[in-house]
Amino acid sequence: MEEISILIGGKAGDGTRQAGHVIASLLNRIGYRIFFYDDYPSLIRGGHNFSIVRASEKRIGAHKNTVDIIIALDQNTVENHKNRLNADGIILYDSKKVEAQGLGIDFMDIVKEFGGKPIMRNTAAIGALAGILNLEWSVLERDIKGSIGKEVELNLQIARHAYDRIETPLKPLQKLDQKPLPLVTGNEAIALGAVKAGLNMYIAYPMTPASAILHYLAEHENELGVVTVHPESEIGVALMALGSAYAGARTMVGTSGGGFALMTEALSLAGQSEIPMVIAECQRAGPSTGVPTYTMQADLNFVINAGHGEFLRVVLAPGDAEEAFYTAGLALNLAWKYQIPTFVLSDKHVSESIFSFEFDLDRVKPENGLLWDGRGEYKRYLDTESGISPLAFPGNPDAIVKVTSYEHDENGITTEEPGQIARMQKKRLRKRKALADELNKYDTVNIYGNPESKTALLCWGSTKGACIEVAEMLDLKVVKPLMLEPLPVEPLKKALSGVEKIIDVEVNATGQLAKLVAGQGFCIDDMILRLDARPFTVDDLLGNVKEVLS
């Protein structure tokens, strides 16, 4: 199989991520499918940043530990990553700043020769890389023009000079007969999926790794027709979202675990008042501040059980950009159909990684909830057979739209009468049956690998990509629930039918999915858990699974 992995590293401020984006775009242009992993500490300057661009002729959703080329903009990159290099790999390094065995080019001197800025060393590195890979200059030129917004001609001069320094291509890369695909982060996919489902307003307080949803929607506010708001706190975010949804605006909020902790009172308010609430909860390592720029799958129990009292919610967990697109649209539609909180439970690895993106735009479209027909007296909490009450919004001269955090009757009037309390509790929970019937229309559990295998890897969210590749290598089955609340028990039973050994794979310390499914009678034989705030790579997981099977 034709593929290549390239690592570029340097200090924060060296432009490694931007260079990685250009490299990913360059390889995409010549027909490769891309997975881009970004690793950075919580620092604006200094520290050690690196990105890994993996390009393959087939679809991929994970990176590997080993790489074919290391581009070193500082010495730390060599010291930290030289052990990753394949036997025939190459280190391309800035010869004035780095000592290494490989190909040294004085990137800074090239930049100075053309009067560029120090950060443009990354452009020189990209030019040299294109020469090493034997790519046509026209491809690189088009890529730089499409990827770099400022001082394009200067960057082209620097890249060309470095490109011409490579007399003999050291790792010629074959151009593939495949069309380029859009390159999209998980966060961008969440934003676009919600927009396709009719998103009107996005409200968020910036918190890594969800911040990019806010930035993306704010940057494209006019084209996408979405109002973006940055309030003073996560508490303000959640309460403002309830107010905008009450007024009829399809609204989504975004945060991570620490921010969601502040929203839980508003979550219970949404449950009681039956106001639609969509939350993109992008997990990072905790507890508390934890490791803010790294990944973890440790908020599953929290999201499923957050809030006081008993009320229905939906939790969807995408494993790549395409699932992020579809689940965001589904979450918005289900929230408005059933007037409940819904979650898109992502994590740093899905949210900030870049994927080759294939999607069906027509698969996501707005689906309206039950709207009041204007006849008779309007009752906001009308006790219907399905438990779903017709919606009307303030400004309708024929309806008094009353919502409350207190228990209430059908009109929304406060009550403490036992019969009314029981009636409203039953009404709200009755939605579960209608929701279950609707969810039967969707693929809530996906199967990959060998469907006949007696051994299955059970995973969720961002572990999907690594699990699929390992399963293909070892002829195993992968079972991945897309929906985690309500847990799709019957589809899970069907997917695991005939399986004799279940290996649970998660990026957390306690096996939260394993415990969740064990509560429904499934027997988990082994668990492979990663708890160092890093995602599974393909080669790491391959070794883990082989050890369990031996």
Image: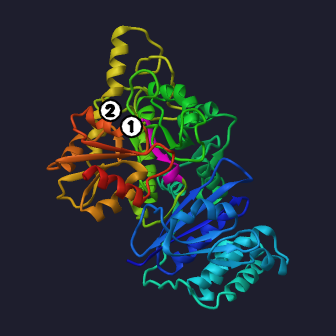
Asked which secondary structure carries label 1, the reply is: helix
- Coloration of the structure image: rainbow
Asked which secondary structure carries label 2, the reply is: helix
Residues 425 and 169: in front is 169
Count of residue discs: 2
Q: Residues within 10 Å of mark 2 (few under 14, many from 20)?
A: many
Q: Quadrant of the N terminus?
A: bottom left
Q: Which residues are magenta?
A: 337-351
Q: Residues within 10 Å of mark 1 (few under 14, many from 20)?
A: many
Left or right, 522 with reference to 222: left
Q: What numbered label is drawn on residue 338?
A: 1
Q: Would residue 91 be counted in the magenta stretch?
A: no
Query: Residue 254: x and y, percent?
Result: 56, 43
Q: Would residue 343 be counted in the magenta stretch?
A: yes
Query: Residue 468: x and y, percent?
Result: 33, 59
**Contact flag, marks 2 and 1 (Cβ < 8 Å):** yes
Query: Residue 83: x and y, percent?
Result: 53, 64
Residues 126 and 71: in front is 71
Residue 170, quarter of picture: bottom right
Residues 488 and 87: in front is 87
Q: Residue furthest left?
A: 498
Q: Which residue is mark 2?
A: 431
* Residue at (75% x, 71% y) in the render: 120
Rounded to the nearest angstrom, the CA distance separating label 2 from label 1 is 7 Å
